[in-house]
Amino acid sequence: MNLIYNHIPDRCCSPQRKQKSPHPLLLRSIFLIIVLVIAACHTREKRYNQHVLPAEAPTSPEQTEEFAVEAPPFTEGIFPCSDCHNELEPNPTRRELDWHEEVTSIFDHDKENRWCLDCHDLNNRDSLRLASGKLLSFEESYKLCGQCHGEKLRDWRVGVHGKRTGQWNGQKHYLLCVHCHNPHAPKFEPLTPEPPPLPQKISK
Amino acid sequence: MKKDNSRRSFLKNIALAAGSAIALSSCDMKAIDNFLQKNFRTLSKDEVDDIIASLQQEYKEKYGKEFTVSAKPATDGILFGYALDLSRCIGCRRCVYACVEENNQSRDPQIHWIQVLQMEKEKGIDFADSNIHYNPEKVPEEGHFYLPVQCQQCRNPQCTTVCPVKATWQEPDGIVVVDYNWCIGCRYCMAACPYGARHFNWAEPSVPDDELNTNVHYLGNRPRMKGVVEKCTFCIQRVREGRYPACVEVCPVGARKFGNLLDPESEIRYILENKRVLVLKQELNTQPKFYYFFGV
């Protein structure tokens, strides 16, 4: 240490300097002022943090089964199905359709094993049909999807799968599965991204 | 005492009076009021109301529009938390621009509170190797995943502790906010933030008049000025009214989740209890309230 610092004049510890040390009372008062300022700041912050609105009463949790969903996104003019199907003879034989080209051309939902009447009802065309035979309106189609995708349905019910809008602590608007996934070709379509951020400018 | 009635002293006094009058008239009362305004956290209710009223007046003159400036405080029993589903995000950047519009971020120079990082699945979360300028025809791209980063709303925020003037702090409901009137623009907080979540107004911000959001909060999306730092506030103007943040509502894949961490029934709590969750840069002990999870 001495080897490194011996060329620096030992100013701070010279005897003249030592005699001039400030009065202990002055030091104490400075210290006291600093403590007071810090304490004052902390009390102010504390007071601000206590200034909150009272907690609100929890919003009615009675809606557990009923979801506020939008109407199903039908292709225009396609519903009610009975408008056309009432005049047709129901045919339960599994076959390649030569009708409904808009569906058959894109159909990709376990194509090997499934066809129309696995979800649509033979006799009541305006209804969906669960595997149990129970009829279901199109507004409740999530129950139909949930027959196979039970884990997704569970997440959707609690608000984890899918998009919610509305109030985070109140009325939430749900979307049906079919608002995002085409039921006949459910894979999510890729999107065009919005423009990337501009490169940072050095000067204007 | 002898009175000095000389011509010299008369001219001196006149010059002094004229100089002071000019100096005072050049800055109106509002500028003086602004200059003398105290730190937001030390203001009384009445003082806040006065400031809000004068801000509304100022914005009306400046932008020709009626603004609703709120200063609604936090509500007891609420701690905001956010979760983002990494398995769903496709990197479409809808959130980035919804945030820009909702929060009146400057278009030129450009400020984005959300940055979407594209990463390679093979490498995992690797900030050094991430890319924010990806721009393919369609997203998601093969072999990549996307990680949007914004303010992580830390429980232990380092940006607030370094602020030399206490212009930024954590609200009782957990949102880290900035008082733009108190910020001196030293940018210490930007250096302290490990997530790059704070942004500086290097020039006077510009927002087209017809794209201004007039529903603003004092601590959030009100128009900023040159030389202040800004950041994501979980859309404080929306969430304190019970609404979802703008990025949550716009996300086309539903990857963004928001709620009250203190409410055991909330979706955010469900995620924390049932999904695989991570936070960014956990080793820094910033304790974010912004979680990333895998929904599948």
Image (cartoon, helix red, strand yellow):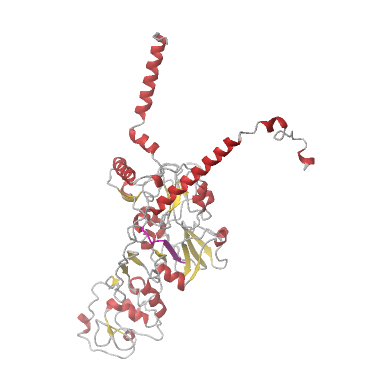
Tell whether B115 sits left or right of B217.
right
Expressed as whole percent of the image width and height from the top left, the position of residue B162 reads 52, 48
Q: Is residue B1 visible?
A: yes
Expressed as whole percent of the image width and height from the top left, the position of residue A184 reads 35, 78
Question: As drawn, which residue projects farthest toward the bottom?
Answer: A93
Tell whether A137 sits left or right of B229.
left
User: Is residue B113 within the magenta segment?
Assistant: no
Expressed as whole percent of the image width and height from the top left, the position of residue A151 reads 42, 78
Residue shown at 23% from the left, 80% from the top: A81
Residue shown at 47% from the left, 72% from the top: B275
Residue shown at 57% from the left, 68% from the top: B122
Residue shown at 28% from the left, 70% from the top: A70
What segment is highlighted magenta in the picture? Answer: B75-86
B222 or B140: nearer the viewer:
B222
Query: In the picture shown, does residue B106 fall above or below B248?
Result: above
- For the N terminus of chain B, the image quarter is top left
Q: Is residue B230 visible?
A: no
Tell whether A76 sits left or right of A34.
left
A204 or A172: nearer the viewer:
A172
Query: In the picture shown, does residue B55 fall above or below B112?
Result: above
A81 or B60: nearer the viewer:
B60
